[in-house]
Image (cartoon, rainbow, N blue to C red):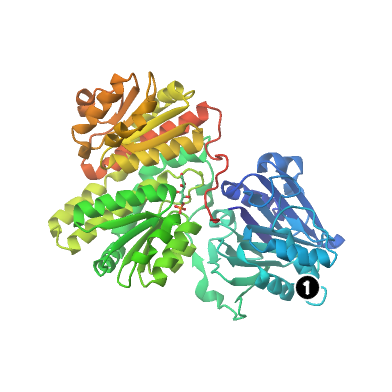
Amino acid sequence: MCGIIGVTCLPSSRNQKVAEIITNGLRSLEYRGYDSVGIAMIDASERRIIIKKSDGMLEQVAKRYDFPNTPGFTGIGHTRWATHGAPTQINAHPQVDCKQEIAVVHNGIVKNFLELKRELEAKGHIFKSETDTEVIAHMVEELSKNSDTFTAFKKTVSMLEGSYALALVSVKEPDKIFFARRESPLIIGISEGINLIASDIPAMLDHTNAFIPLSDGEIGWISPSHVHLESLSGEVVDLKKRIIYVDWKSDMVRKGGYPHFMIKEIHEQPQVLKNTYEGLMSDDILDRAADLLMRGEKLFVTAAGTSYHASLLLKLFFEKLTGKIVYPFIASEFRTVEHLADRGDIIMVVSQSGETIDTMKAMRAFRARGATAVAITNVMGSTIGREADFTIPMRAGPEIGVAATKTFLTQALVASLLSIKFSSKVGKMGKDEERGALAILGEAGRIAGESIAMTEGAAKGMAERIHTTKSLYFLGRGLGVPLAYEAALKLKEISYIHAEAYPAGESKHGPIALVERDFPVFFIVSSDSSDEIASNVAEMNARGALTVALAPEKFKEKLGAKVLFRVPEVDPMLEPYALTPPFQLLAYYTAVRRGYNPDRPRNLAKTVTVE
Ligand code: F6R
C-alpha cells in the first residue's frame, strides 16, 4: 500500500528541481503509507545515486535530509506502509544493489523473495535490509552484467511472484526510469520535457493532465521525451489509444485553508454531491447501467470498508424501490459466495480508488464465472474502472484524507439514482414518479450543507465530552444500520476509541451488557426506524447511558434521548445526506481533541492493495 513516484526531466525544461517535484508528489501520496520515506536521485555527472531515506513522516525526514535540494534530473521516491521488515531507515525504500548503482521503489509484496535472495546470496550479493524489495535491485545488478538494464529488468520481473508496482533507476542509463506493474496501481504522466510515473494521479497533477494507467503485466521505461510500454510477452503498446485526460486540478489536492484534508472533504460534500448529480443527469449512463441490470438474473454487490457500507445502502434502496433482491458481501470473503455466481448474473462493485485488491479479486472471480461487472468508482482509469464491463463515475474529485467521507455520500447518491432508474425500467415506478424522485435527490448537496451547518458545533461539543471515553455504540434501524456501521468505523479509525455498531434491536441480545453510567450510545434515527427505536433509547437510559440521538427535532420528544444532534427534516430518500455529516464531524473533532492527525490514522493506508 505504499506510494511510489518517479520523475525524469530535461535539464532545461523546468525551473523546479526534480527532487522537489518528487518531494511534492510524495506529499500527496503520503496517505498511502507513512511509516518511512525516501528518494533516490541519479547524479549523472558523478555517476552515482544519492539516496536519502528514513523512518518517520515526510515533512520531518524531507527537512532533515533536505530532499528538495538533492541534485539530479531523474529520480524516484517512496512512502512506505510496512509489510516485510519493520519501519526502520534500512528497510525504507529506495532499496539498492551492492554498489548502489541501481535503486528501486516498490508497492506490493514479492512472495518468493526468500528463494531469490538465497540464490543471489550464493552468488555473493550482500543484503542490508529485511525487505522483499531489495532482491529486485540485486537481481537487476546480477542480470545486467551481461545485458542492458531493460532486458535485465524484464527478466527480473518475470521471476517475481506476488504483486508489484515498481520504479527502478540505474546509473548505467541515467535518464530512464524502468517500471512494471502487477496488481498494484501505477500510472504514467506525460508532459513536454518531463515524464512521470506514480501510484496515483494526484501526485502528478502539477505537471500534467494526460495519463496512461497501466494494466497488469505491463512493463516499460520513461525518459524525459519518450515512453516505452510493452506487455510481459513483449508486445509493444500503442500509447495513443491509451491516454486519458483527467479534469482534476492540482488545487483539489491541497488543503485550501483547512487544517486537515478530512474536514475539507467533509465541507466539500455539498459541492461534490451537486457535481455527481449533475454529471449523472447530463448523460444516459444510468439508463445504460439500468438496462444492463435488467438483464441480470441475480444481483450481487461487493466492496470493502466504507464502500461496503455504501453497498448496504445500495441494497436497501434497490430492494425498496425495485423489489429485486441484492446480495451484498464483503469483498475479502468472496470465496464463500463465488460459487453462487453464474453467467447472466450481475456483480456491482463499489470502490472509491478502484484499486482495492480484495474488491478487484472478488470482481475477477465473478467475471470468471460469467457474471457482468458494473463498477461504481471515483477513479475512472483505475484497474476496477477499466476491467469492469460497465463503469459509473462518482465524480467526488480526489479524496486525500485516509478516512472516506465525501466519497461515501457520493456512492450513496449514485446508488439511489441507479435504483430509481432501475425501478422505472422494471415498471415499479411511472415516468412522473421517476422524475419526481430524481428531482428530490437533486437536493442531496443542499441537505448535506444544511446538516453540516446545523451539527458542526454540536459535534465539537460532544467531542469534548467523549474524548476520554474508552468505548461506545452506534445504533440504528433500517437505513440507520449501514449509517451506524459507517459512523463506528469513522470514529474508531481516526480517534482510536473503540466504537461498535449494531441494529438497535440487536443491542438487547448481548451488547447492552457493557452499558453502565455515562456509556455513550448514539442513535442514528431514520424515518424507517419507526417507534421501536424509542424503546431502545429507553432501555439505554434505564442503565444510565449517555444517549445521543441524531434526528430531526420532531422526534425529540418521542425518542427521549439525553442529547439531540438536530439534523434537517427531509424526504426519506435524502436522509443519508442529513444523518451522515454529524457523525463524520464527531469523528473528526474527537480525533483532533485527542491530539491525533485525522488524515494519518496509524496502521492505515487509503488504498489497500495487499490482501
Ligand atoms: C474507511 C476507508 C476504507 C475504504 C476501503 C475501501 O474510511 O476509507 O474502509 O473504504 O479501504 O476502499 P475503496 O473504496 O477505495 O475500495
x and y percentages locating residue 257 in the rendered image: 52, 36
Identified at 39% across, 67% down, the residue is 366
Residue named by callout 1? 143
**Is the shortest distance between ligand 1 and the CB of mark 1 under 8 Å?**
no
Instruction: Decide: few, some or many residues near mark 1? Use Cα within 10 Å; few <14, some 14-19, many ≥20.
Output: some
Residue 193 visible in the picture: yes
Q: Compared with residue 546, is residue 448 higher up or lower down, i.e. above or below?
A: below
Q: In the image shown, does 596 or 268 lie closer to the viewer?
A: 596
Q: Is residue 86 left or right of residue 541?
A: right
Q: Quadrant for residue 141, please give it.
A: bottom right
Task: Name the element at disc 1.
Answer: helix
Front residue of 562/333: it is 333
Residue 506, x across and y down, in percent: 29, 36
* Foreground pick, 367 / 580: 367
What amino acid is labelled 1 in the image? Leu
Residue 230, above or below 288 = below
Residue appearing at x 67%, y 62% in the figure: 167
Residue 98 lies in what quarter of the image?
bottom right
User: Residue visible at 67% across and 49% down?
Assistant: 23
Whether 480 is drawn above or below 539: the answer is below
Counting every numbered tag in the picture gives 1
Left or right of 139? Residue 27 is: left
Q: Position of residue 13 (x, y in %)?
A: 69, 62
Residue 90 is left or right of residue 189, and the answer is right
- Residue 385: % across, % down: 44, 63
Report if residue 11 is visible in the image.
Answer: no
**Image quarter for residue 466?**
top left
Give the residue displayed 79% in from the left and 77% down from the top.
147
